[in-house]
Image: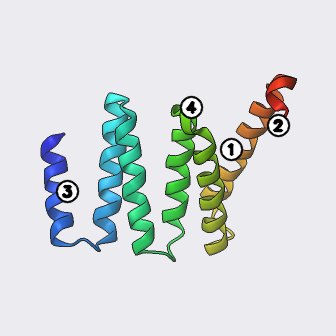
Amino acid sequence: PAGTIIRCHADLSASPKNVLYWRTKGNIYFNFYQISLNTDYMKKGLAAFQKAENLAPTDPRMPYTVALYALQLYDIDTTQKYMYQQLVEKELRRALYLKPDYVEANTLKATYLKKINVENTNKSPEESSP
């Protein structure tokens, strides 16, 4: 993995505003996460896609992908669940604002809402109260 990251860093050093390179970096980190289950790789992938989103603010795929990564981290990193929940909601709103008929974003939104509803239904009364 180190060689792949070094090459990716070299490409980004040469072209730091290339959205494709940032997306590729995010995908590489996701692949590393799948192999190792090391959450740090998932977080680095999320950061790469957030950078890509800053470089391409009108591309609905960027906030969709950030929401997808954040939803994955919502399930993995229980210490920061609320932060990831807020990020998922914000990024899905952004993706659907940019492209209201974005099928994948609408599907992710439905999946997310179902997940949140199931989690809230399974809470005990003590957990549900503020």
Task: Tell which circle, 2 or 3, labels the residue nearer the N-terminal end.
Answer: 3
In the rendered image, residue 128, in percent from the top left (x then y), is placed at: 83, 31
Horizontal side of 76 relative to 42 (left or right) equals right
Task: Tell which circle, 3 or 1, labels the residue nearer the N-terminal end.
Answer: 3
Are discs 1 and 4 less than 8 Å apart at CB?
A: no
- Judge depth for marks 3 and 4 and give the one in front: 4
Image position of 93 with respect to 73: above or below: below
Horizontal side of 45 relative to 128 (left or right) equals left
Image position of 110 with respect to 122: above or below: below
Q: Which residue is mark 4?
A: 78
In the rendered image, residue 117, in percent from the top left (x then y), is placed at: 79, 38
In the rendered image, residue 95, in percent from the top left (x then y), is placed at: 60, 66
Report the front residue among 124 and 110.
124
Q: Distance from label 1 to label 4 (Cα)?
A: 19 Å
Q: Which residue is mark 3?
A: 8
Q: Which residue is mark 1?
A: 111
Callout 2 environment at 10 Å: few (<14), some (14 to 19), or many (20+)? few
Q: Amino acid at mark 3?
A: Cys
Q: Distance from label 2 to label 3 (Cα)?
A: 45 Å
Q: Which residue is mark 2?
A: 130
**Under tag 3, what secondary structure?**
helix
Task: Tell which circle, 2 or 1, labels the residue nearer the N-terminal end.
Answer: 1
- Judge depth for marks 2 and 3 and give the one in front: 2
Q: Distance from label 2 to label 1 (Cα)?
A: 25 Å
